Image (spheres, grey):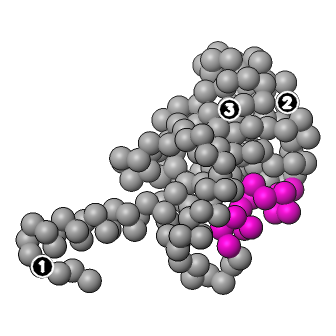
Amino acid sequence: MEINEIREYAYKNIVNFSILSNKRIKNEIAILYCVLQGNTHFNDRFQKIINSITDEIKNNIVSINIISDENIVLDIIINEKYYFEILLKFPKEYPFRPPEVEINNNNYIKLLCNIQGKNLYKNNNNKSCLCCSTLCCKHNWGPQEYIFNIITEIFNNLKIIYLPVDDIIYKTILNKNIGYFID
């Protein structure tokens, strides 16, 4: 598929797609929608982008909602039970400035700071803190980045946060009901 075919498909299938004025945002949302719908027959130009969206991410994005010209909401589910509403607020300077991200009405960068501060995340890979290493930080963003990179990062960070929660709950249930102490 060429970009014109992709956009035409999006115009027909995404509510409010026509209100988007930024050409790059239109292209990225159209490609994302096509990938989520199972259309993967793109020309080579988009193949690298398409390959960055794993099946796990594809299967967990529930919907794409265009709220306004600058606001897009993605509904996702993590670990088949945690629902998140991700609001992407695009500045007029996009792609030269990163979008502001809110997860369930909480600023994404502040959320990462809180997680880091409460030791809910263990940094094993010698990177800086979560909030400073995010693509949403203006120092890490550049026009070579895409919405897909942000979605992948958010998805991975939410998995890192919620996998230990599942593990703790599982161990607590086993300890309480079976009487075994699980380390």
The residue that label 1 is drawn on is: 180
Residue 2 visible within the image:
no
Q: Does the magenta stretch include residue 140?
A: yes
* Nearest to the observer: residue 11 or residue 15: 15
Residue occupying the far left of the picture = 178
Q: Which residues are drawn in magenta? A: 129-142
Give the distance between the C-alpha atoms of the residues marked 1 and 3, in whole angstroms: 47 Å
Question: Label 1 is placed on what type of residue?
Answer: Tyr
Question: Label 3 is placed on what type of residue?
Answer: Ile
User: Where residue 103 sits in the image (x, y, percent)?
Assistant: 59, 45
The quadrant of the picture occupied by the C terminus is: bottom left
Residue contact at pointers 1 and 3, CB within 8 angstroms: no
Q: Give the number of the disc on residue 72.
A: 3
**Above or below — where is 16 with respect to 172?**
above
User: Where residue 32 sits in the image (x, y, percent)?
Assistant: 64, 38
Task: Tell which circle, 1 or 2, labels the residue nearer the N-terminal end.
Answer: 2
Give the distance between the C-alpha atoms of the residues marked 1 and 2, in whole angstroms: 57 Å
Quadrant in the rendering for residue 168: bottom left
**Secondary structure beneath label 3:** strand
The residue that label 2 is drawn on is: 22
Question: Label 2 is placed on what type of residue?
Answer: Asn
